[in-house]
Image (tube, helix red, strand yellow):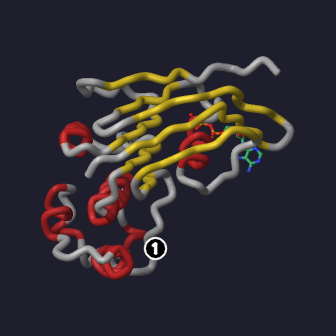
Amino acid sequence: MPARLSATDLACRRGDRVLFRGLSLALGPGGLLHVTGANGIGKSSLLRIMAGLLSPYGGNVESDGAIGLVDERPALDPELPLGKALGFWQRIDGAHDQSANLAAMGLSELLDIPVRYLSTGQRKRAALARLLAQQVPIWLLDEPLNGLDTAAQAKVLELVGAHAANGGVTVIASHQPVALAGLQTLALEEFAA
Ligand SMILES: Nc1ncnc2c1ncn2[C@@H]1O[C@H](COP(=O)(O)OP(=O)(O)OP(=O)(O)O)[C@@H](O)[C@H]1O
């Protein structure tokens, strides 16, 4: 699934602060970008702009391929058992058999547990399982490794590597090191207005 994602001369303003300006990037098939920077610098805002959830203050984003965003707010009904909460999206995403995705994220035994009882890491795994079910070529991952144990972190990196090998594009905002071949880094820095 070849994909492209680019941003040209992007600016972001939140409240009365311009977080960044003049930001450009271009990712082609297999592109991997790690966005780094201090708390509050604008990493999540950049991902939300690229996902189309936040309007840029300037510049534009172009994408070739559908986009999936995983952030700290998994859109899973907290009252529903995990299987049913994921099933809601399965119908919308048109995904077929989820069992491989659930097994990949170690969720097969948790389908009867209400989402509100899941641990932080289990919730993150669930959000990632939903991303896999979406089968979209562009992944925007906001702190995808947060709360995951070592094995799950390795699994996520393996999945991202496989996604890139299939021609997918991935942008990862993370404070954690991301050990992936071919990774580019974008370090957001304090913008002097
Ligand atoms: N709705 C909003 N209105 C005004 N300011 C906001 C809003 N949402 C976020 N901000 C501010 O924008 C700045 C950037 O936030 P963002 O979440 O993009 O940072 P981040 O780099 O992802 O931080 P972290 O590493 O802590 O996750 C922060 O100072 C934040 O307080």
Snapshot quadrant of residue 111:
bottom left
Snapshot quadrant of residue 172:
top left
Placement of 162 over or under 122, stated as above or below:
above
Which one is in front, 24 or 148? Answer: 24
Q: Quadrant of ligand 1?
A: top right
The residue drawn where x is 19% and y is 64% is 102
The residue drawn where x is 29% and y is 61% is 135
Q: Quadrant of the C terminus?
A: top right
**Residue type indicated by callout 1:** Pro
Snapshot quadrant of residue 59:
top right
Residue at mark 1: 78
User: What is the total number of numbered labels drawn onto the structure image?
Assistant: 1
Q: Position of residue 52 (x, y in %)?
A: 59, 55
Res. 50 visible in picture:
yes
Q: Position of residue 171 (x, y in %)?
A: 42, 38
Q: Position of residue 174 (x, y in %)?
A: 45, 33
